[in-house]
């Protein structure tokens, strides 16, 4: 069975979408490990409820100077080693709020994908052209839903892409556009984006699993 490790930092609604699809027999894959840097991440409880292996790999306090880089490198090594112990075919960053360096990515070459709650272009550029021909900024970083509302963008959405050392970049696997409504708040927009994220992550994982099995 195509094995998935899921890394998350919060509630784990995308993990739940994967687990529900697995239970329904439509995923063609199995979640074998869920990891978080936060002990209070509710996604860990979702995994425990299903009897899955979970791991808490805490991010150490951030000292200043070279010690910070050394501590972060050691944490990434622990994170990679724990994840690799379960020999995943795919590592899914599902709301994982930490940037991973090549030191981690090299453990799983070409096998790490990320969900990003904004629309990203295939060329890694600064703008994205919507299906209606509108050119909007390609939003990157941790606060892109709020930024879409603040900028008054007409459209936002989500992107699933393979992870590369460049933040919020890499080959695009799927996208979905979501209109930004006049009365949207970051919370209301994010809820509608999540609906599309849940659909896309299941479709992408099922496609990758089928491709490997064929």
Image (cartoon, rainbow, N blue to C red):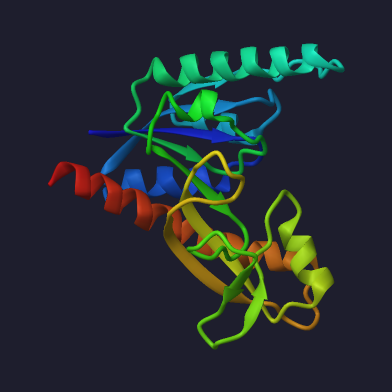
Image quadrant for the N terminus?
Answer: top left
Front position in the image: 13 or 73: 73
User: Residue visible at 51% across and 22% down?
Assistant: 54
Q: Is residue 22 above or below residue 121?
A: above
Residue 67: name its quadrant: top right
Q: Position of residue 168 (x, y in %)?
A: 59, 50
Towards the viewer: 146 or 68: 68
Q: Is residue 118 left or right of residue 84?
A: right
- Let me know if residue 48 appears in the view: no
Q: Up-down: is 53 above or below 154?
A: above
Give me the residue at 79% from left, 78% from top. Answer: 152
Residue that extends furthest to the bottom in the rendered view of this protein: 132
The answer to whether residue 197 is above or below residue 80 is below
Horizontal and vertical percent position of residue 122: 48, 63
Residue that protrudes farthest toward the right in the picture? 64
Q: Nearer the viewer, residue 17 or 114?
A: 114
Q: Is residue 180 left or right of residue 131?
A: right
Q: Which residue shows up at 69% across the image and 19% down it?
A: 72
Please tell me in which quadrant of the rendered image residue 177 appears.
bottom right
Q: In the figure, residue 97 lies in which quadrant?
A: top right
Asked whether residue 89 is in view, the answer is yes
Residue at point 55% right, 38% down? 165
């Amino acid at each position: 069975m195509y094995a998935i490790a899921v890394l998350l930092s919060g509630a784990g609604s995308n993990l739940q979408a994967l687990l529900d699809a697995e239970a329904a027999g439509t995923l063609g894959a199995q979640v074998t490990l869920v990891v978080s840097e936060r002990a209070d991440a509710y996604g860990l409880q979702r995994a425990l409820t299903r009897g899955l292996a979970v791991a808490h790999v805490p991010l150490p306090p951030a000292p200043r100077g070279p010690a910070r880089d050394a501590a972060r490198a050691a944490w990434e090594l622990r994170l990679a080693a724990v994840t690799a112990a379960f020999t995943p075919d795919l590592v899914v960053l599902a709301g994982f709020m930490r940037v991973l360096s090549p030191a981690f990515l090299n453990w799983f070459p070409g096998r790490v994908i990320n969900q990003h709650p904004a629309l990203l272009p295939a060329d890694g550029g600064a703008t994205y052209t919507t299906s209606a021909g509108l050119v909007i900024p390609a939003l990157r970083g941790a606060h892109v839903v709020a930024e879409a509302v603040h900028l008054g963008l007409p459209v936002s959405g989500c992107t699933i892409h393979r992870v590369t050392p460049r933040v919020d970049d890499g080959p695009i696997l799927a996208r979905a556009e979501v209109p930004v409504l006049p009365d949207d708040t970051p919370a209301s927009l994010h809820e509608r984006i999540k609906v599309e994220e849940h659909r896309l992550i299941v479709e992408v994982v099922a496609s990758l699993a089928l491709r490997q099995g064929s």
